[in-house]
Amino acid sequence: MKKPPTFQIFTVLLSLLLISAAGIGRERSIPTVPRLLQAVGNSNNLQVRKGTPFKIAIFADLHFGEDPWTDWAPRQDVNSLKVMSSVLDAETPGLVVYLGDVITANNLATHNASLYWDKAISPARDRNIPWATVFGNHDDAKFEWPKAWLSPSGVPPTRCPGTTSGCPSRGTTRVELVQGEIKASVKGLSRTMMGPNQLLPSVSNYVLPLKSSDPSKPAVALLYFLDSGGGSYPSVISNAQVEWFKTVSNARNPDLRIPELIFWHIPSKAYEKVAPPTDDEISKPCVGSITFDGKVATQDAENGMMAVLENRSSVKAVFVGHNHGLDWCCPGEKNLWLCFARHTGYGGYGFWDRGARIVEITETPLGIKSWIRMEDGFVHSEVNLSRA
Ligand SMILES: *[C@@H]1O[C@H](CO)[C@@H](O)[C@H](O)[C@H]1NC(C)=O
Ligand SMILES: *[C@@H]1O[C@H](CO)[C@@H](O)[C@H](O)[C@H]1NC(C)=O
Ligand SMILES: *[C@@H]1O[C@H](CO)[C@@H](O)[C@H](O)[C@H]1NC(C)=O
């Protein structure tokens, strides 16, 4: 069919317009690329890259700053930096989660524990990897004055050994630690948030969406961080935290379509019920390599939090640290996975080889799996965290 002349003119004009627009686009694309990259780097978004699984490295119980007035103890921190570096270089994760007990504040004769906190985070920051932190029971603990520091006559020294001023009368608070972390975070790499005021004294309660590689699609996963207490107040998940979680999760994921992962430091009582028995080999459905004592040191109270999580089929797994001699994942009620991290730090008790739990989220097909990478590179205990 012959087209009318007006249509032909229109087509020619349109083609000219498109060609020139494409030309402009090509010319401009050179200077705009760095600007776009910068925008992505500065945004607070975690985003999956198309065709690439998103990995999270969990660093648990680093315990920086134990007995820093001795010779041997600072060497532990250097060793912990080596563990983190080796894991990060092998896995190149998109996010690092510092899962509490980043520092041993009760050993720190300093007025500002942020300096130790900052050191612990440096391996992620040095590699431009975003990180998120939650608190453990040692992070804001009060300095405990060693009895050995008393003179034979029982007279306390006027100065704490290794410090230039008197012994601190209190620990660095959770709020001060978060503020210090965010202030010291270059390029906005810290994804940690203070959390709502109504949840105080519990701090670091927040959610981070992991965005899809396709911006028009909903988030690939929601990562929830909660403060399980300990240190300056009892180890509890409060009623207020449970209500906060219900409100936030219902608002963000009302139809339970987005997988959700939970991170906090101290295991809830549900972990006790599924723990592989003492000195037994860990057998399916549990997956792991160490079950020292089998004993789980749990939170004091959780105010129904686990029932809420079990009831949401979108919640696939909970990740905790705290027990250095446990590294298993076991399915709990309604097949919700309960996972321990792996003791990462040379600080803190325990003689087990150090490592880190890795969580891998794949967008298409959607899947979540996890494994443990050791300091020497050995990988073990891979587990599929889909909730059957
Ligand atoms: C503690 O040190 C950090 C830097 O690591 C700094 O940002 C913060 O202001 C300091 N806090 C206090 C109370 O001195
Ligand atoms: C479990 O979920 C259903 C709907 O998904 C809801 O009506 C019910 O209140 C929930 N129960 C608990 C204990 O959260
Ligand atoms: C993980 O488990 C789920 C549920 O049992 C299953 O559908 C899925 O295929 C498994 N994924 C892999 C990679 O094995």
Image (cartoon, rainbow, N blue to C red):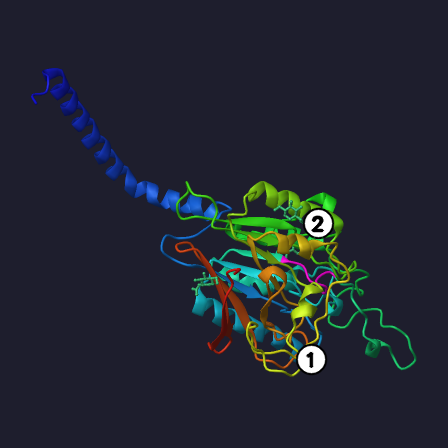
Please name the predominant secondary structure of the magenta segment in the image. Answer: loop
Image x and y of residue 271, in percent: 67, 67
Q: Label 2 sits on what residue type?
A: Gln
Pointer 1 local density, CA inside 10 Å: few below 14, some 14–19, many at least 20:
few
User: Is 155 rendered above or below residue 7?
Assistant: below
User: Is 247 rendered above or below residue 294?
Assistant: above
Image x and y of residue 12, in percent: 14, 24
From the viewer's side, name the closer residue of 110 and 34.
34
Task: Name the residue located 60 percent from the left edge and 46 percent from the top edge.
Answer: 249
Task: Name the residue located 77 percent from the left edge and 62 percent from the top edge.
Answer: 300
Ligand 2 within 8 Å of the CB at mark 2: no
* Disc 1 target residue: 293
Q: Label 1 sits on what residue type?
A: Asp
Magenta-colored span: 134-140
Q: Is 359 on the left or on the right of 303, as rendered?
A: left
* Disc 2 target residue: 241
Q: Quadrant of ligand 3?
A: bottom left
From the viewer's side, name the closer residue of 257 and 105.
257
Q: Is 19 on the left or on the right of 219, as rendered?
A: left
Q: Is 148 on the left or on the right of 119, as rendered?
A: right
Question: Secondary structure beneath disc 1?
Answer: loop
Question: Secondary structure beneath disc 2?
Answer: helix
Q: Is residue 341 visible?
A: no
Image x and y of residue 22, in percent: 23, 35
Q: Earlier in the sequence, mark 2 or mark 1?
A: 2
Image x and y of residue 235, in percent: 75, 60
